[in-house]
Amino acid sequence: MPNGFDVSPDEIDAHAKAVDSTVSMLGHAGGAAASRLGFEDFGVIGQSFAGYCNAYMEYVTSVLKEAHTAADKHAEAVRAWAETNRVNEDSITSAFGGGG
């Protein structure tokens, strides 16, 4: 029988907070990626670069939005895991007369 792993609900909560931080950063990055460059932003010689950048920004914005959605779902799943783990730990502790 495999040993599995031993992790406390508090450690899972801490991981969920770290994931929440990543979700927040992805949200900010997505917002920044949604901005567009004007043709004058690269100067007269570099005007064509603005068009290329804007074309790729659509793709980048889409990818960041998907990553944000996935990370948010992951954070929700980790929080649910922490709660389930906490309930299990509390149930087992109280079944053996522990806790307070």
Image (cartoon, rainbow, N blue to C red):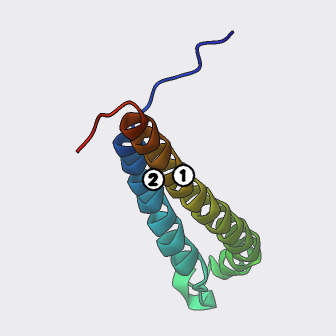
Q: Residues within 10 Å of mark 2 (few under 14, many from 20)?
A: many
Packing grade of label 1 (10 A; few <14, some 14-19, many >=20) is: some
Residue 27 image point, x, y percent: 52, 73
- Asked if residue 30 is positioned above or below residue 82 in the image, the reply reads below
Front-lying residue, 50 or 81: 81
Instruction: Give yes or no for contact between labels 2 and 1 (Cβ–Cβ under 8 Å).
Output: yes
- The residue tagged 1 is 78
**Mark seen at residue 16:** 2
Q: Does dot 1 land on a helix, a strand or a loop?
A: helix
Task: Name the residue rendered at 65%, 67% in the picture.
Answer: 64
The quarter holding residue 40 reads bottom right
Q: Nearer the viewer, residue 48 or 5?
A: 5
Alpha carbon distance from label 2 to label 1: 6 Å
* Disc ID at residue 4: none
Q: Is residue 54 left or right of residue 25?
A: right
Which residue lies at the image location 37% right of the left edge and 35% below the top edge? Answer: 93
Q: Quadrant of the C terminus?
A: top left
Q: Secondary structure at mark 2?
A: helix
Residue 77 placed where, x, y %? 60, 56
Q: Quadrant of the N terminus?
A: top right
Residue 96: x %, y % from top left: 38, 30
Residue drawn at (40%, 43%), measured in percent from left and top? 90
Kind of residue sitting beneath label 1: Val
Q: Residue at x 46, y 25 (%)?
A: 6
The amino acid pointed to by label 2 is Ala
State the residue lying farthest toward the left.
Answer: 100
